[in-house]
Image: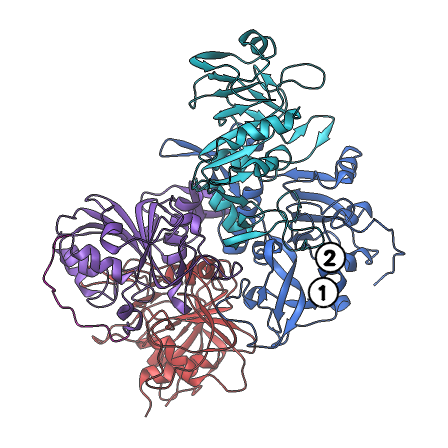
Chain colours: A purple, B blue, C red, D cyan
Amino acid sequence: MRQNKVTPLEEALSYLESGMTIAVGGFIGQGDPLTLIDGMKRIRHLKDLTLIANDAGYRERGLVELVRRGMVRKMITSHVGTTPYIAEAMNSGALEVELNPQGTLVERCRCGGGGLGGVLTPVGVGTEVENGKQKIEVDGQVYLLETALHADVAIVRAHKGDWRGNLMYRGTSRNHNTVMATCADHVIAEVENLYCMGELDAEAIQTQGIYIDTVVRSDLLYAVERPVEPAHYTDLPIKEV
Amino acid sequence: MRQNKVTPLEEALSYLESGMTIAVGGFIGQGDPLTLIDGMKRIRHLKDLTLIANDAGYRERGLVELVRRGMVRKMITSHVGTTPYIAEAMNSGALEVELNPQGTLVERCRCGGGGLGGVLTPVGVGTEVENGKQKIEVDGQVYLLETALHADVAIVRAHKGDWRGNLMYRGTSRNHNTVMATCADHVIAEVENLYCMGELDAEAIQTQGIYIDTVVRSDLLYAVERPVEPAHYTDLPIKEV
Amino acid sequence: MASNKETIARRAALELHDGMYVNLGIGLPTLIANFMPRDVYVVLQTENGALHLGPRPDPGCEDVDRANAGNDPITLLPGGSYFDSMTSFCMIRGGHLDATFLGCFQVDGEGSIASYMIPGARLAGMGGAMDLVVGAKHVFILTEHVAKDGTSKLMKRCTFPLTAADQVDVIITERSVFRRDKGQPFVLTEVATGYSLDDIAACTDMAYTVADDVKLEAFGR
Amino acid sequence: MASNKETIARRAALELHDGMYVNLGIGLPTLIANFMPRDVYVVLQTENGALHLGPRPDPGCEDVDRANAGNDPITLLPGGSYFDSMTSFCMIRGGHLDATFLGCFQVDGEGSIASYMIPGARLAGMGGAMDLVVGAKHVFILTEHVAKDGTSKLMKRCTFPLTAADQVDVIITERSVFRRDKGQPFVLTEVATGYSLDDIAACTDMAYTVADDVKLEAFGR
């Protein structure tokens, strides 16, 4: 580990390989790591990815762009209703989608990051979510055993970050970024604002630098891009990294 | 629920009854809710309590004072080495002690607060901790099923709090206070500094007011009492509340 | 005359009582905020990580990092807070919310709902709905009484994949209110202006009983 | 001449490498901080919720809300942070710490340790030790080689209740260093100044092999 984890975008993304499982923070555009996703779009040889993420972005912006480019084999997710293309890709057989209740997805990633094998949740009992899962009764209540998820790489976005990878988020952009930052072998954080060591309040840090391997500067344009009125999908010329 | 949850100490403690299970935040003096514990010491009729807490305090200060008064039947805890009287009480048969690995205790309380039935942890496999517990294998690794803990009441201490029970902690006094504040039917928080609505930073709140039923002002003396050199044990005259 | 959705939201708002912590689902339930009585103090949660939502920000003052689970811009009231998804779903599953109001595709007499996919037609995903329905102390389902093709949305048994089984406490439509205790059948407690008990029976497929003190002309229009 | 504890701590400090995240247990392991090489950048964690511990504060500048798991006052270095126990134990169990250094009552040839109670004599409780030993990537046990009664603390099998089974990677005593791969027996890799291979054999009950390149006079005094 280096003391200063700040790295140029393309060097940071050179860690990625085809076939990897990638955990991604964000919630339908809020806190989505768009700089890193846009960087991934340009890596022409990257494919067969499995994505762990709450959703695929918003309309045509976010992880759905990787799916459109045929880079994704499978999504482990909770909601794809904001990205109509995902259902299309699924129906055509190009994409496998595994739906999890959102709280279950969070717990499974937390287990993966926190050394736990799984959790017992009442959520999903009596629904299709229970298919293939072990049911365990504790004190007369039936729970599903939901097992840990762990990724090769996680990508997250924060509002502030320091050289060591300490992160702070802003408003509802915190969401899944904190848990995704814990559940991978290698974690890349993009930060909208970069600070020197000691500039962030030790009491207010929301992801500790111990979890972060690489810090990349966000493209500041994304920080003000409105997810409620997302940019139109434009198929930019793909440049191989 | 009232909009202003601030309550006089004795009114707040009038909720307590003999036989209750009480979850307590703090770590060997750091963040221990001493104002509330001192208030409990004065409730002469309170007994048969079960305490869920990381420890019993430091030397003669903290939960050990309730044990000394014969108010406690059982402690579900992780470490009692800093309060020698606990081993004495246990050996004399006056107190039952259930030891949990600290991380397991945290997860069990988090389950109780978060609607989960239990978690699978590798911690304790091959030790006495596994006695009487279900072992579950996931992907070739053996885990213990550790079940949820839930309390009737929780007592916690924070550095700052507002009328609605939003809490912020200071330094290492945060520790178990955040999780204990979630795992009880009724939660009483003592705060060293009380703020009006909106004075605390919405991004920095560490326990959300939704978890808190009653806010009590800490005795400010305790905020500067040194846990590293705790006050000598003095058996103050007991006054019935 | 009010739209069906407005009628439902207006009636649902009457279920809010002082001091409740509440999550309003995407779509129709969000409209309830417009009809909350001014003198009732309710704390709204959104599952993507905020508590104590205030009114929608003024046009042009929307903030990219302040939005609800439907991606609508939000403000926070004093005493509000932001938190992450780990915290949010412990709050939801752990029974800390007094109520959740949700829409659905189908609801049935056993208190089950279907809201996350229509096989062969629509794939949305359950998002936080399964957690909300299992975790909240009271589950209110808001739905139009009949589908566009005229069939009842209050069915004997849901035919789409379930969001949760046996969890619904109250159904509010533009024509009626039904309540039940867990494991029990629904009881018709209110009928809206313009409908008779027979009208309700004709457009309701699920089994239910009629309360002794059922209120006619209870709300609507 | 240095005390046994100082010799052990000084030797243990050589195991610290640039960029490691490390938890030092209460007691003897805490002394390691005094011997950390100045040019080695190591981040210290304490399980009660802080990362990046600095030197002990000046006398009179101790703060009630800034202490480690042994209740000793701490400072934080720039880049440090405070967090709660939920976060701390996910960090510990999840393999995010490169190493933990712990004391013990007993350690054995199967890589198991006993450190939290002596039946009939002492009840401490495991605190965070079980989580640390299972979760940290490398587990270093620091112990005097023999107990006060002259018996070896490096036993065939622990007799007190175990803190963890088959988790220890390295044992450092004032007389020797042993290393092993999980599931394998220990290998003697270093002998301290003043001791021979025979001396070590005489005071070690656990089974071990001797490394081909075992270092004699490797450290100490």
In percent of width and height, residue A101 lies at 35, 56
Number of callouts in the render?
2
- 10 Å crowding of disc 2: few (<14), some (14-19), many (20+): many
Which chain does the residue under circle 2 lie in?
B
Disc 1 target residue: B218
Q: Earlier in the sequence, mark 2 or mark 1?
A: 2
- In the image, C220: left or right of B102? left
The residue closer to the viewer here, C5 or A109, is A109
- Say which amino acid is labelled 2: Leu
Q: CA distance from mark 2 to mark 1?
A: 8 Å
Give the quadrant of residue B16. bottom right
- In the image, B71: left or right of D178? right
Q: Is residue B92 magenta?
A: no
Give the quadrant of residue C74. bottom left
Residues marked 2 and 1 touching at CB (< 8 Å) = yes
Residue range highlighted in magenta: A228-241
The residue closer to the viewer here, B90 or D85, is D85
In percent of width and height, residue A181 lies at 38, 52
Kind of element beneath mark 2 = helix
- In the image, B179: left or right of C69? right
In percent of width and height, residue D78 lies at 50, 55
- Above or below for A133 versus C141: above
